[in-house]
Amino acid sequence: MKIYFPQWQGSGTGEVIENGAKAILDYLNDPEFIQIPLSKILAGKNGEKKYNINNFDALKEQLTRLKEYTNQTRPKTIKTIGGDCGLEIVPVSYLNHKYPNLGVIWFDAHADINKPCDSPSCNFHGMPLRILLGEGSEHLNPLLFSTIKSSQVHYIGVRDIDEAELERIEEGAIYATKNNNIADLVQTLKLKNITHLYLHFDFDCLEPKEYNKTYYEVSDGLTISEAESDIKILQENFNIVGSSVLESTTTKVSELQPISNIINLLMK
């Protein structure tokens, strides 16, 4: 199943994320992608915060649509053009239910593992992993097909971590090495008997000197060639059942050229 879900409300006010997703859709020009409609509930500057989550009602409405469509189609694999990172709670929880002990690879500058009550911004795209762990919000738990364990989460490129997130990472012994060491990650996954993977890819994992059309720019990221190599090695060693490309902000297809190989690897 291929999904186009340009959710931006999880970023708070970052409507440019929707435009960035559309540019990737236009670049791929693949009619197999199905669009999940976004909510028309007021969001962004006019949005309402509930339960310490900005734009809560809009998010819940459109994520419910995504869950319902996923439940109806029951796909074997899911590829998603997004959108902000908060959308991941549906595809990851679905594939985790379908493939027990799914490995979740989180290419991201940010840990995205805040509880709503701990989030400095109250923006949902910083919370999806905590929701997936079943610890985030009782008001959103009905959107999950299943919950994951700390041992299933593995970061690549993470470097901008809030204090509360760091505590949760250390408490759960979550894989979050400072240096990019794909051989070590492969060995770790195999020692856990993980055979199926979900590849979450937020483009801010990349070094902004190489690609800066992202919602956030965080220095000291992965080079594009490192990211491409990591993805290829993971694809060679494991069964990739889900992947996403998220939070690119360029509206120009031509500006996607530096990351075109990454998009192709994850979406084709």
Image: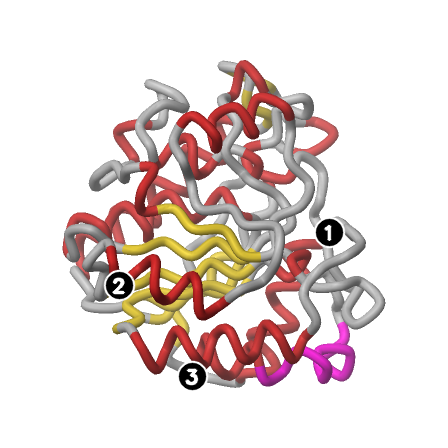
Inspect the image, locate mark 2, and give the three-letter code of the amino acid beneath it.
Lys
Q: Is residue 99 left or right of residue 144?
A: left
Q: Helix or strand or loop: what does disc 1 sit on? A: loop
Inspect the image, locate mark 3, and give the three-letter code of the amino acid beneath it.
Lys
Segment tinted magenta in the rendering: 252-261
Crowd tier of the residue under label 3, counting other residues whose Cα lies within 10 Å: few below 14, some 14–19, many 20 or above: few
Dominant SS in magenta: helix
Quadrant of the image occupied by residue 254: bottom right
Q: Is residue 36 left or right of residue 202?
A: left
Nearer-N-terminus badge (3/2): 2
Task: Determine which residue is flagged by label 2.
Answer: 190
**Image depth: mark 3 or mark 2 in front:** 2
Q: Looking at the image, which residue is at 42% across and 40% down? A: 174
Q: Which mark is residue 268?
A: 3
Q: Are marks 3 and 2 in contact (CB under 8 Å)?
A: no
Rendered view: 203 above or below 160: below
Q: Which mark is residue 215?
A: 1
Q: Where is residue 62? Give x, y as percent.
A: 42, 42
Structural distance between the alpha carbons of marks 3 and 1: 24 Å
Pick the residue in front: 175 or 13.
175
Rendered view: 11 above or below 31: above
Pick the residue in front: 29 or 128.
128
Q: Where is residue 49? Give x, y as percent.
A: 59, 19
